[in-house]
Image: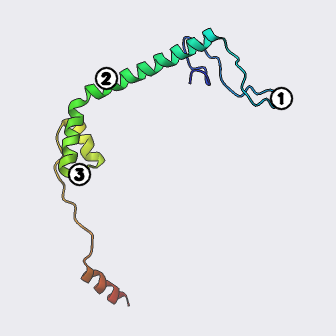
Amino acid sequence: MVTEYGMSEKLGPVQYEGNHAMLGAQSPQKSISEQTAYEIDEEVRSLLNEARNKAAEIIQSNRETHKLIAEALLKYETLDSTQIKALYETGKMPEAVEEESHALSYDEVKSKMNDEK
């Protein structure tokens, strides 16, 4: 991100990496100074630390919700998106809505097939 796309406030919109092979040269040539390489490393380290801290903050701030979801998974084994959303928003499992089954028994399928013949 920093070296290939120049996405760094500190180093600016400059591409430091890429295919710089000249006239069929096989080994990449060093095109940046040691100071610039150090600054790139520092910027990458800073971005990674920032991302890690943000991830830790998100996990910590949602710790209770994660615990509820984990407990529900232990109890029910699977959760659908509606249940997860309800746990996240209300902290409670939604009321179970019994859906009418449209499945046919073996005898019903057999009878239906005989009727179609």
Residue 28, compared with residue 10, is above or below; it is: below
Specify few, some or many for label 2: CA neighbours under 10 Å numbering under 14, 14-19, or 20 or more: few
Name the quadrant containing residue 106: bottom left
Tally of marks? 3
Cα separation between marks 3 and 2: 27 Å
Specify few, some or many for label 1: CA neighbours under 10 Å numbering under 14, 14-19, or 20 or more: few
User: As shown in the figure, which amino acid type bears the numbered disc 3?
Assistant: Glu
Report the residue marked by disc 2. 57
Report the residue marked by disc 1. 23
User: As shown in the figure, which amino acid type bears the numbered disc 2?
Assistant: Glu
Name the one closer to the observer, 58 or 17: 17
Q: Pick out the residue farthest to the front.
A: 27
Give the left or right position of residue 92, taking residue 11 as reference.
left
Name the quadrant containing residue 24: top right
How is colour applied across the structure in the image? rainbow
Residue appearing at x 60%, y 20% in the figure: 6
Give the left or right position of residue 19, taking residue 24 as reference.
left
Report the residue marked by disc 3. 77
Residue appearing at x 61%, y 24% in the figure: 5
